[in-house]
Amino acid sequence: MATGGSVLDRALEMQGQVRRLDADASREQLAKSIAQRVRELEDALSKLDSMVQFAQAVSKYSGTQVHLGDLHVGMSELQRQAGSTGLPKERVVETARRRVLASANSLAERSQEAWHAWITEAFTRIPTNRIAGLDPARQQAVRAMVDELGRLGRRNNPTERDVEAFGTKHAAILEELAAARHVPDELLELLSRFGSHPITLRDITDAEIALLREHGMDGEIEIRRK
């Protein structure tokens, strides 16, 4: 039969085991919580990296430098604590995540502004009237590239690859049109009339229609009934 002392000793031993288990569980829960915060920080860093690549591509092709800002903000304190203790506090990881995400969002805003300014200016530099100086097959190819530029420019979340595609196609279009043969002044004047205001079929002569067909531009003119 157990004495009162032995029962008390056993109870105290069991109590100590329970406390150790609780402490282990608390440490495990804390480790899991920190691990989750680290994964969220990694996502923020991944977004920042994508924004840096996008900004650098815009700078490269547009010729306008996009300021990257302080890419290391929020990470210095985290790195210092990780180096000294091995396991940074959860609040430090969360603070780093918020600061990294803020940097990514700020860079995204600056990059988008530069991107939209560039593509707007890039379209104005395309001498579309010179398409008439290309043979029909090349006209079709250039128009397809111009359409693709439009699709790239309308994307809500453009990527580095979209910037590269836009820059490459835009350069190819300018090169193609620079090599186009001379376009008669009367054709350029006619195209300018179509672009300035709506005109009726009565306002177009048979000679002007023939001129459009001669240079493969008749497919560019749309006729609608009032």
Image: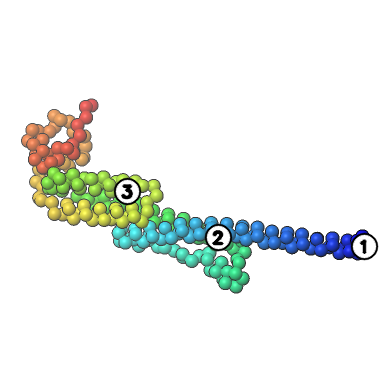
Look at the image and tell me whether residue 188 can be seen. no
Instruction: Report whether 2 appears left or right of 141.
Output: right
Look at the image and tell me in which quarter the C terminus lies. Answer: top left
Tags 3 and 1 in contact by the CB under 8 Å rule?
no
According to the picture, the residue beneath numbered tag 1 turns out to be 3
For image coordinates 65% across by 60% down, the residue present is 28
Closest to the observer: 49 or 65? 49
Of the residues under marks 1 and 2, which one precedes in the sequence?
Answer: 1
For image coordinates 38% across by 57% down, the residue present is 54
Of the residues under marks 3 and 2, which one precedes in the sequence?
Answer: 2
Look at the image and tell me in which quarter the N terminus lies. Answer: bottom right
Of the residues under marks 3 and 1, which one precedes in the sequence?
Answer: 1
Mark 3: secondary structure: helix
Q: Image quarter for residue 22?
A: bottom right
According to the picture, the residue beneath numbered tag 2 turns out to be 38
Crowdedness near tag 1: few (<14), some (14–19) or many (≥20) residues, C-alpha within 10 Å? few
For image coordinates 41% across by 60% down, the residue present is 52
Instruction: Report whether 70 appears left or right of 56.
Output: right
According to the picture, the residue beneath numbered tag 3 turns out to be 152
Mark 1: secondary structure: loop
* In this view, 223 is above or below 88: above
For image coordinates 84% across by 60% down, the residue present is 11
Look at the image and tell me whether residue 210 can be seen. yes
Tags 3 and 2 in contact by the CB under 8 Å rule?
no
